[in-house]
Image: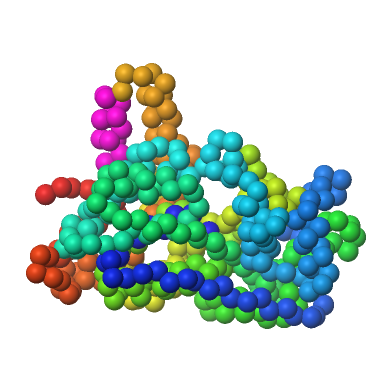
Amino acid sequence: MLETVSMWVPARSAVRPLWNAARVVIPCIWRGKYFSSGNEPAENNRVTPMLRHLMYKIKSTGPITVAEYMKEVLTNPAKGYYVHHDMLGEKGDFITSPEISQIFGELIGIWFISEWIATGKSAAFQLVELGPGRGTLTGDILRVFSQLGSVLKNCDISIHLVEKTPQGWREVFIDIDPQVSDKLRFVLAPCATPAEAFIQHDETRDHVEVCPDAGVIIQELSQRIALTGGAALIADYGHDGTKTDTFRGFCGHRLHDVLTEPGTADLTADVDFHYLRRMAEEKVASLGPIEQQTFLKNMGIDVRLKVLLDKSDDPSMRQQLLQGYDMLMNPKKMGERFNFFALLPHQRLHGGSHQMNAQQSRPSASPVAGFDELTWR
């Protein structure tokens, strides 16, 4: 999933709604298949209102995709997890980088300032944040660059799981376990489904997660950046097309079986940045992914931490700053698992010209902050 997608675009550009693909029901014989989830003992699998809802749905229409399962569990207006739970923070199920330390959002703000300067200082532009949260990231960015305007949207995307079988690629669906009436299981579709169209012909993995919704978002961002300029910075847990099964649940900051007690835990999956790069379709240039510890160090996190520590006489505040720094930078925590990925106009990297008003200067091919060590002229 895309946890944070921040973008600035010229003010004349607007973000249109994004549409989700409809589910295709295939009335065939489904083969049971167990993966890393769904193996909890039946006595430990409490029948939640969401589980009851999903069982009625599956009995009515047949097995559902993992993408539809995620959307039902998380965003169903009556029983969805996000509707009835505050999933962020220490009392929630997970915590995002902006919630850990103010430094994170401040450095993202500096990244946008750097790109704004490098591309000619547009007189007006939009700051767009797509992702879950309370607006903490945007608030920190605006504190750094108070002239920015803000458009805040939600980013609800889900994945499809596809596995290689002797009969070819087959999508993974979710069905009711025929041996246990109140338990769900994974099954393999008996024939081809639309999700398989997103798999590359030279794919070497035998289990792939594809996210058409993320592809739509990236194509939309790429088209707007190519036409009107701007930049997009994407930050999330992810990989460069190397991982297989990352679909997982979180409850109280602990891993939770994705098919157990649906509606009581958050569901997520890592971003495949290789897939995002391919979805950009060469309309824009891309940088990354690079690990968070490298990006933040290039952005000057050590300098900013020292400034905040020097200004603080409160021992508890100093400890909080150091703990936040450790969470963001420690390779065993978020330092190597969180990644950054950027979309930029091609001319931004090659120093080409683009349409500018009289108050704008010619853009330079200066290094991109975060992906190279940040320097100020």
Of 113 and 323, which appears nearest the observer? 113
Q: Nearer the viewer, residue 21 or 278?
A: 21
Residue 230 position, x and y percent, is 28, 65
Residue at the image point whose x is 42% and y is 45% from the top: 136
Q: In terms of image quadrants, where is residue 172?
A: bottom right
Q: Is residue 346 magenta?
A: no
Q: Nearer the viewer, residue 164 or 199?
A: 199
User: Residue, x 49% and y 59% (percent of image)?
Assistant: 154
- The magenta span reads 295-311
Give the answer, above or below, for where 140 lies relative to 359. Answer: above
Residue for point 63% across, 66% down: 67
Does 102 sit left or right of 12 as displayed? Answer: right
Q: Is residue 108 left or right of residue 324?
A: left
Q: Is residue 304 within the magenta segment?
A: yes
Where residue 339 sits: x, y (%)?
42, 52
| Residue 118 position by quadrant | bottom left
